[in-house]
């Protein structure tokens, strides 16, 4: 008897819990709060994208947030095909037009140019180009400063305290 009552009740409780969890996913416009068109954004997950203004959308003037600025695929912000982008999972990608894609007529931005796995075509350096030192050069300087400080410390330690004798 108890099993016949408890089974359906636990199933209903699980469905209510799952429905409330799905309802708590924030809308894509909250990730762009305070940002502008083309700015990077992060959705829960984390999922990475760019803020894109949907010009067919009408923003509700009674709310603080702009409901028409959405965090979507970075290539939808107007990046050209073949351009570097950060995929939703945070890995490097490239914008690529999608075959057999039908854009949503209720959205004003390009939805058939998507950030996919790939690398941007690189060019070989020309004769006049040279690599500039990046962070590696600053690491050497920081290492030398620490080494100098260590040397001063060892020197002071070897001198000893003048009041010891």
Image (cartoon, rainbow, N blue to C red):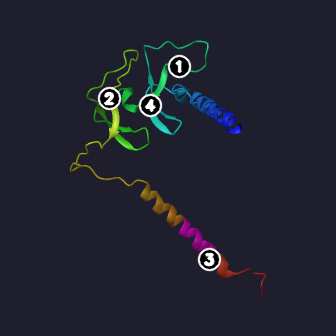
Could you tell which of marks 3 and 4 lies nearer the N-terminus?
4
Residue that mark 4 sits on? 50
Q: Secondary structure at mark 3?
A: helix
Query: Nearer the viewer's eye, disc 3 or disc 1?
Result: 1
Q: Position of residue 32 (x, y in %)?
A: 52, 28
Q: Can residue 95 be spotted in the picture?
A: yes
Say the numbered circle drawn on residue 154.
Answer: 3
Q: Are marks 2 and 1 in contact (CB under 8 Å)?
A: no
Classify 10 Å Cα crowding around label 2: few (below 14), some (14-19), many (20 and above). Answer: many
Q: Secondary structure at mark 2?
A: strand
Highlighted magenta segment, given as a residue range: 146-153
| Label 2 – label 1 distance at C-alpha | 22 Å
Q: Do the residues bearing badges 2 and 4 touch, measured as CB atoms within 8 Å?
A: no
Where is the C terminus found, in terms of image quarters?
Answer: bottom right
- C-alpha gap between disc 2 and disc 3: 61 Å
Q: Can see residue 34?
A: no
Dot 2 corresponds to which residue? 113
Determine the image quadrant of residue 110. top left
Q: Could you say whether the residue bearing mark 4 is in a helix, strand or loop?
A: strand
Does the CB distance between marks 4 and 1 fall below 8 Å?
no
Q: Residue at x 58, y 21 (%)?
A: 65
Which class describes the residues within 10 Å of circle 4: few (<14), some (14-19), or many (20+)?
Answer: many
2 or 132: nearer the eye? Answer: 2
Between the residue at mark 4 and the residue at mark 1, the CA separation in whole angstroms equals 15 Å
Question: Which residue shows up at 46% across the image and 57% down it?
Answer: 138
What is the number of the mark on residue 67?
Answer: 1
């Amino acid at each position: 008897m108890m099993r016949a009552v408890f089974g359906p009740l636990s199933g209903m409780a699980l469905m209510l819990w799952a429905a409330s969890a799905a309802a708590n996913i924030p809308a894509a416009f909250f990730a762009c709060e305070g940002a502008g068109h083309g700015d990077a954004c992060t959705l829960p997950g984390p999922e990475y994208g760019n803020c894109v203004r949907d010009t067919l959308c009408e923003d509700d003037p009674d709310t603080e947030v702009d409901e028409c600025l959405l965090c979507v695929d970075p290539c939808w912000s107007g990046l050209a095909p073949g351009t570097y982008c950060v995929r939703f999972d945070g890995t490097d990608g490239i914008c690529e037009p999608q075959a057999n894609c039908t854009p949503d007529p209720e959205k004003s931005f390009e939805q058939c140019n998507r950030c996919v796995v790939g690398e941007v075509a690189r060019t070989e350096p020309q004769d006049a180009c040279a690599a500039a030192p990046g962070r590696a050069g600053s690491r050497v300087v920081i290492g030398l400063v620490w080494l100098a400080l260590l040397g001063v410390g060892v020197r002071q330690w070897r001198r000893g305290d003048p009041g010891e004798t």
